[in-house]
Amino acid sequence: MASQPARPRPESASVVDVSPFTPSLVKAVFRDVTPMHVSRSAVWAAASVTRTVLTEIIDGARRAAAAHARKKLIPGDLLSAIDNNVELEVGHQWYDHSPTFRGLTGDLYDAEGVIVPSRKRSRSRKPSAVVGAHRFEAGVKKLLRSQGATAVPAMVRDLNGIASVFLTDLARDAVMVVREGGVKRFGTLTPVMSSEPAPPPLLKGSLHTLSVRRGDGRTIGRDDILAATTLQLFGGNLRQRALTHAHETPQNTSAG
């Protein structure tokens, strides 16, 4: 009997595969942020960047779980992944909401040394990345399966929240890029561990290209998403991969 070809590792899958974060979800997040029109290529680029970031977080958590001979991911693996790679520290608004990060964001104490309870969140009609985190659950679970990973419900909830906050922040930065006519600032800090090689340079000419915007002021395009990505992510390997994958995402697709 002929041997069956080996199945490719999850991380070797083509970056142009359909993102687990659907165009309708991405558009809904942008509608929460801005009335601007979002082009189809921008929607797919935003989905691609979010997928790259979440894939990296899950990969780091998998390594942390494997170090303890566990297969199912728990919130502690998320903390370990972030501790081991500062580039994964995204979606900060979720940190104040999730019990996983309790104590890491700083507790307030009164004069007697008693912890001051956090203020109760009032109901707001304004859309929130935290409130809308549940919308990402189907995509997060699909991404976990594609990576051959499973996670406890609390870990899934954290991944939902981080994805929601990250994409919302990406949308806000894209709006800023449109309004300012390009990127006016870039993160120059490149975190590298002493035992690791320096990350490769960004795509040739990419910073110069994204620093000056072309197009009308009413539509968010793919380049606006790429520019926003440079503001959201450190100038290291993760940002490079996110930009590369987004560049390789087809600009024209019938999906969504």
Image: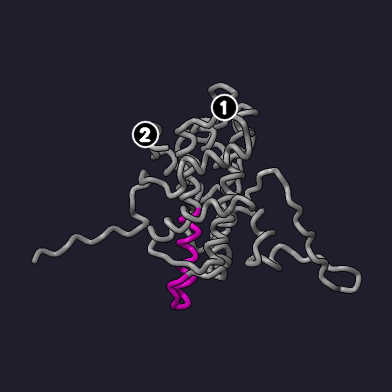
Q: Hey, which quadrant is residue 175 in on the image? A: top right
Residue 235 x, y percent position in the rendering: 55, 47
Of the two numbered discs 2 and 1 on the same chain, state the one appearing first in sequence.
1
* 148 lies left or right of 126: left
Residue 12 x, y percent position in the rendering: 34, 54
Predominant secondary structure in magenta?
helix
Task: Residue at 42%, 56% (x, y): give it.
Answer: 142
Is 12 drawn above or below residue 102 in the view shown? above
Visible residue check, residue 221: yes
Amino acid at dot 1? Val
Between marks 2 and 1, how big is the CA–CA gap?
Answer: 29 Å
- Which span of residues is magenta-colored? 54-72
Q: Any magenta on residue 249?
A: no
Is 18 drawn above or below residue 251 in the view shown? below
Task: Residue at 42%, 37% (x, y): give it.
Answer: 256
Pick the front one: 49 or 240: 49
Residue 32 x, y percent position in the rendering: 62, 40
Q: Secondary structure at mark 2?
A: loop
- Residue farthest right in this picture: 111
- Disc number placed over residue 212 in the picture, else none: 1
Q: Secondary structure at mark 1?
A: loop
Kindly indicate whether the residue at mark 1 contacts the one at mark 2 (C-beta within 8 angstroms).
no
- Disc number placed over residue 254 in the picture, else none: 2
Residue 148 x, y percent position in the rendering: 38, 63
